[in-house]
Amino acid sequence: MKVIGRIKEIETLESLCKSESAEFVAVYGRRRVGKTFLIKELFKERFAFWHTGVSPYDKNKKGLMSDQLREFHYSLMEYGYKKRSVPTNWIDAFHQLQELLESKDTGKRMVVFIDELPWMDTARSKFIPAFEHFWNGWCNKHDNVMLIVCGSATSWIKDNLINNKGGLYDRVTKEIKIQPFTLQECEMLFKSKGIAMCRYDIVNAYMLFGGVPMYLNAFEKGLSVAQNVDNILFSKSATLKFEFDRLFKSLFKNGEQYQNVVRFLATNRSGYTRQDIIDGAKLKNGGDVTDMLKALEASDFVRSYVPYGNSKRVKYKLSDNYCLAYLHFIDKKKVMDEHFWENKNASPELNAWRGIAFEDVCFNHIRQIKKALGVQSVHTTEQPLVILDSKGKRETQIDMIIVRDDNVVNICEMKFYGKPFAIDNKYEMELRERIVSIAETLKRTQTAHLTFITSFGVTDNEYSSIVQKTVVMDALFE
């Protein structure tokens, strides 16, 4: 299977491989996003050493360090290390790796890949000091070494490697974040698998699974989107039946607490403040909450934003498509129908959900929307907008506003329909009221432009002239 997309990442990694200096590369991103696959396919037979940390999921924590050391030794032996003694600590383990690499050193580039590095840092293992010593004491002195470390626990990578204040300070020569696929890359993936799927259906799939390659690779040729969704989420042998638990327990030490925060965030699509989260998820106020939210955001489960007109009130919203779908349709719900998506596909319930889920698709494709608006070079900020009345109750809510430095504010309405969206008299009046409400919050130099982002455009009728600009679904695939 060939690599889909990832053009810039491949160019960067190949350039680093050709470098004449020692390179320390940190690759991170959401779990299941294809980090390992990219590195494996790119370097293939060029590895001098490759090891993957042992997953802590469903493991006995008391014996996890010895498991990690034993598996590390097995990897050394796989690449030609001759000594049979299993190391009892990480200083000895990395010394054994050093011996292996010295035996392989011919002067040519040696690619050392350690996957899921955060898993190896178990409690009281003194892993980081040993790893620091390995890089500073040996790797850094060999210009032909390219050390690639990878992990899904993004906050660990950032705190312990990229932003390290100790022995690894400023040692990472390149950090690469692997993002989920865009809609265009999803389309490329389905085509590569021979799966016939129109763009409307691709967006439907994206609403549930985002651009996570592992989830999309579960789609089978010859089945409809609804049939695939049932196989992946609702059947007795559903591919992602235990994925929600695995995601958080394999990434975070207190996985259940992270799940509680995510469950609470799922109850409001516009998000909550930090204090709301403390109260709603029953957390103790303190630095742990800040670290938890930072970790969730770093791993692309949560997005933070500042509501328009309020520069201090940061809100956090759940942004991971799979988690949103799982918590809405499956978590703690007794759905017994193995063909739930097929049977409910055209129901008002699913259509209403798609309307909301389409907002997240649009937020994940801001770059494409800006290009369609012709403002790709203009600095912008994007967020939902809620205007409250004098009693603090919601008066006006806008899916997204794009505040541009060229003094235009795009008031965006997202509509996911199977045909062009028709504005009628009643809805036009509602739109005019919204424009007036928002205009009152703008600066004198700013102008509001009503913008529709839809599947197939807006029907040209007597009410459509209120729309300044229309962005169609195809533009999101650019």
Image: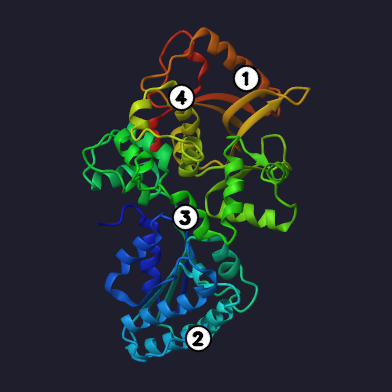
Circles 2 and 1: CB distance less than 8 Å? no
Seen in the picture, residue 109 relative to 225 is either above or below; the reply is below
Q: Amino acid at mark 2?
A: Thr
Q: Earlier in the sequence, mark 2 or mark 4?
A: 2
Front residue of 54/149: it is: 54
Left or right: 444 with respect to 170? right
Front residue of 261/216: it is: 261
| Mark in front: 4 vs 1 | 4
Q: Position of residue 150 (x, y in %)?
A: 45, 66
Q: Earlier in the sequence, mark 1 or mark 3?
A: 3
Q: Secondary structure at mark 3?
A: helix
Q: Amino acid at mark 1?
A: Arg
Q: Which residue lies under the disc numbered 1?
A: 434
Q: Which residue lies under the disc numbered 4?
A: 349
Identify the residue at image location x=31%, y=86%.
80
Determine crowd level at label 2: few under 14, some 14-19, many 20+ residues with C-alpha closer than 10 A.
few
